[in-house]
Amino acid sequence: MKDSEQPQFDSSSPDLVKSIETMATRLRRHSLTSTTAAGSGHPSSCFSCAELISALFFNFLRFDVAQPDNPYNDRFVLSKGHAAPILWAAWAEGGAFPAERLQTLRNIDSDLEGHPTPRNPLVDVATGSLGQGLSVGVGMALSARMDATGSRIFVLLGDGEAAEGSVWEAVALAAHCKLDNLITIVDANRLGQSQATMFEHDVQGHQARFASYGWHTEVIDGHDVQQVLASFQTALDVKGQPAAIIARTLKGKGLSFMENKDGWHGKPVARGEELDKALEELGSDLELEQELHIATPGNGAGASSGASTQTAIESPKYPADAQVATRQAYGAALQKLGKINPDVVVLDGDTKNSTFSQEFLKEFPDRFVECYIAEQNMVGAAVGLGAMGKIPFASTFACFLTRAYDQIRMAAISQSSINLCGSHAGVSIGQDGPSQMGLEDLAMMRAIFGSTVLYPSDGVSTERLIALAAETPGIVYIRTSRPKTPILYSAEEDFTIGGSKVLKSSSQDRATLVAAGVTLHEALKAYQELQNDGISVRVIDLYSIKPLDLETLRQAAGETQLLVTVEDHYPEGGLGDAVRSALANESCRFHQLAVTGLPRSGPGSELMDVFGINARSIVETVKKLTG
Amino acid sequence: MKDSEQPQFDSSSPDLVKSIETMATRLRRHSLTSTTAAGSGHPSSCFSCAELISALFFNFLRFDVAQPDNPYNDRFVLSKGHAAPILWAAWAEGGAFPAERLQTLRNIDSDLEGHPTPRNPLVDVATGSLGQGLSVGVGMALSARMDATGSRIFVLLGDGEAAEGSVWEAVALAAHCKLDNLITIVDANRLGQSQATMFEHDVQGHQARFASYGWHTEVIDGHDVQQVLASFQTALDVKGQPAAIIARTLKGKGLSFMENKDGWHGKPVARGEELDKALEELGSDLELEQELHIATPGNGAGASSGASTQTAIESPKYPADAQVATRQAYGAALQKLGKINPDVVVLDGDTKNSTFSQEFLKEFPDRFVECYIAEQNMVGAAVGLGAMGKIPFASTFACFLTRAYDQIRMAAISQSSINLCGSHAGVSIGQDGPSQMGLEDLAMMRAIFGSTVLYPSDGVSTERLIALAAETPGIVYIRTSRPKTPILYSAEEDFTIGGSKVLKSSSQDRATLVAAGVTLHEALKAYQELQNDGISVRVIDLYSIKPLDLETLRQAAGETQLLVTVEDHYPEGGLGDAVRSALANESCRFHQLAVTGLPRSGPGSELMDVFGINARSIVETVKKLTG
């Protein structure tokens, strides 16, 4: 790990200790006045971590506030996002912006939001849904190690949020990966939102839990600056393990009427007399014995990320008569992408032999992260990798991405660019039964802000869409299927985000079949059967579910006057809902075929028949509606 | 805890040990032949727990196989659901059904599915999405304690699934609640799906983690029947703590070509020679030295659950000019429901002072479960409580229910009846910012199989809908709002699942405003403004988003020819999508007002203006579309 060019201060200096203490008072005063000005916010949650933040920012953090995207910067993730006011205060005191701006906290035109978001350039990822910051930190630490930038990652957790299981998923992976560039501070202030936390001030319990996973641990009084300084120094010196500093603190520390008292969560001090009294109690001697600033990082020796935009992968090469599962093509595409783009990283949750992400692992083990069966942390780590300039692809069964829906939602608020692949879509997976079937994933992913939802039907389009995903900002979801299906396209075929393909079309079409994935192949079979019976239908491959190719769909609606959507998904929020809702103003009839019952174990083809999403059902439906 | 009327066997008896071993062989043979017959399944994962299952079922479990719903039965949750074949085998050997039926495993007409589901009456909850069983067990153990039935709850976990954070949420709460009627067995067989688990055979690590939360722990060789028997006995004798048995096992134990070998996850043995060889190796001496059966429970002294269907709560009593947040009315309704129905239980995730579930806690502390900030476990525990006959209501911010989407999805497959309340819907919450805003919840909950989605707009309808929720089977979601809003209904007003209310209507209506929650009040303001400008519009309170009141909506579409939906939700999958999709075949124009941008901190009313979902936007939209 590369040392900063700016020497760290001597932790034993009395002037330093006094100055860090004084800075903590400044941070408390800012947190107090800004939340009172906003009329809402969490001052008590800021007060417990004032010494921790003060010491970290002004004696250890290496961060160029003028260049927040400097790859050699350390990173700080405020996992307890409701303490945002003290984060803003620390950046202001560190010279990032004038302290006056702190008074705009929570205003609609301010980037100093109630919980941190990347609207403020000093913030990498949004926090505020608790228990997610450490996963992001794991991703950042992995990225910093891959690039040998020397960046250290600091994550401040609350004790309340340590109840979230996702924290322990991250704790486990961090230790397993020996991330000694990752330091976690637990602000154990004893009080949650509505009552005391489960473990209150049992800091030894917290310590035992971190230690049980193999972390280095320090237990300190989080208001004793000498202890705080010493613990950071020790944590930074630890090799081969991540380090956790468990800090016993008091919520509301410094204000007699608030300190360690229930009922002060998310509650600002009232303007006027109460505020005056509070400011007086905090003290107004704010002169620093020793100058404090945030150190800047040196020019690191490692490679920086985020440079490569290369996505022009080698052409797909499938024989025209090949049978290829789109999940297999996902693996093939990742491997090709890995060859031309060093920023592509792949994560999986112990399903790599099912999602086929193992194809990437075979070639690029150093850029593959096995996250084990812990999907929340996998997505959080992907967000962390993305924040450092990587292009992450994370995969598991489509149904298990539901496990990480909160992380995906927060990734969108983080303006993160990550790619998620959900395999084993729908009842077509067969005998493993409903617990393994992705049937809500399209609904879930469509509702994510700014998301792109792709659903390829053959090997060629899968490979092309994976390459497009790599260059598409925001959350990109790719739905793949378990069964092998025929190749539909030649290697030269072009695909676009928001596009579709009209596979069958004539001026005689009396209906349009709109489908993707396994049901597209059923639509093509139905086309042939209907053709044999003298009924002409159009067939559209709707490989981009969001955004939709409205022009092609509208034209089909106008020309054929009947759209039949067919999907291996529940009726709500999927392909059919998307199409019907978008085209509701068209004077066209709509009919939806989707999985309307609770699935069960059985052969995939039989289930598709039972739930009425196969060629037989399509033929019957078209005949009924056009008869 | 009440003792079984049937004495347990003497664990030290050599005949017992030999018989349990022989039974384990029988279970292995069934698991082997049934998966080979099915052509898929997970025999190796069954083999590692054969002695554990054999000892538990045939020496400790008290379960009347002829009466699976006997409230005094112990419960067994196979959290590692892919080991279903050995579960079915154990029930067959226990006399629940003929062993021949095991050969129907995974057939489309069999209730012996690939992963356990309650299609089989011996199964309480579906498993197969890993890491969820222990949360269910926590709920069951809480229920058994509330009712003093003496039931003991056994949960079998895999070591791979222990990577899921939800497991540790459950571990924490079980210890906090001192659930000494809960016993967890970790089948630490070292191998996951695609490679070794993170901790492989470090059973001491597993032990340290359970112990760090305050569990009693035992580490054993899971194939040594004497150790297995002794550990269960000790675990059952522990008081004041839950107990974990960490069993070191071998995946595929008993078959030389499979035992402790990678590459055998989810893979049956081939028919013919391979199967013959495997059966030979397992051995065919299946005579029991001592008769084994599953003991039946005695008639417990405790009260049984599930009897009360009482939901006729006291009438809402709000002055006509009151301003009441629907979240407040949620709390009031729960309190009333608690008074008349002893089976109602309430769970919250440290947000009870925001969701107002604290109103229930005040009156019924023994039926309130504080789950801390761990939403996955909260929903899992609710499912466990529901499986024991309770009527659970679990609440947190709407956005944080995304954390538990996988648990909610699995609850539907479990045919569970639970009620979930998400408060703080949409941008109207204001300054806390996007991380705290529920904007995907309607999409997420609509896509759940068989779900009911309710979105009340005032105090009266909230109370009535909560009472209806309590008697509605399946997953019921209630969306509540943060701001105070006017009372719309008299205390006598009737509401129904699938209903709606036409609040404004005339023969001159040129548009229909369809809204719920805060936007309904905006629609009413817009109605007045438009009325002042001579434009008559209909206003519908769409309090039931799923199912929809299609008749009323179709009539409005036909009569007014323009439906404007207004919602504090992202555009995809919410109220607008639901209405447009359902009415796509109507010859009516549709327009959707929804949150189309990425929200930020700011006053709720300003945000509703910025995102175009307030009265001003509605008025502008109607004027533009009818002008």
Image: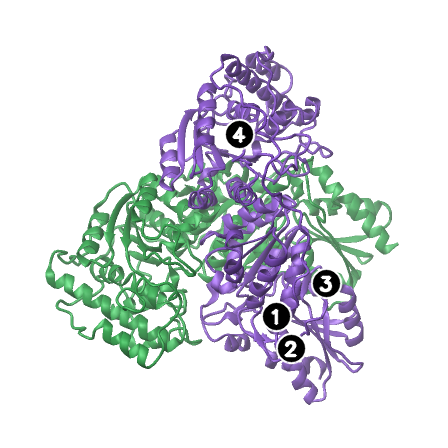
Chain colours: A purple, B green
Q: Nearer the viewer, mark 1 or mark 4?
A: 1
Residue found 57% across the figure and 16% down from its top: A278
Give the mark nearer the N terminus: 4 vs 3.
Answer: 4
Residue found 26% across the figure and 67% down from its top: B254
Residue, disc 4: A265
Q: Residue B233: x, y in percent?
A: 20, 51
**Which amino acid does the dot numbered 1 rest on?**
Gly
Write down the quadrant of residue A506 in the picture: bottom right
Q: Element at badge 3?
A: loop
Q: CA distance from mark 3 to mark 1?
A: 16 Å
Residue found 53% across the figure and 72% down from its top: A483
Q: Nearer the viewer, mark 2 or mark 3?
A: 3
Q: CA distance from mark 2 to mark 3?
A: 22 Å
User: Is A382 on the left or on the right of A535, as rendered?
Assistant: left
Give the mark nearer the N terminus: 2 vs 1.
Answer: 1
Q: Nearer the viewer, mark 4 or mark 2?
A: 2
Q: Chain of mark 3?
A: A
Residue, disc 3: A496
Q: CA distance from mark 4 to mark 3?
A: 48 Å
User: Is A94 on the left or on the right of A240, as rendered?
Assistant: right
Residue, disc 2: A523
Q: Are marks 4 and 3 in contact (CB under 8 Å)?
A: no
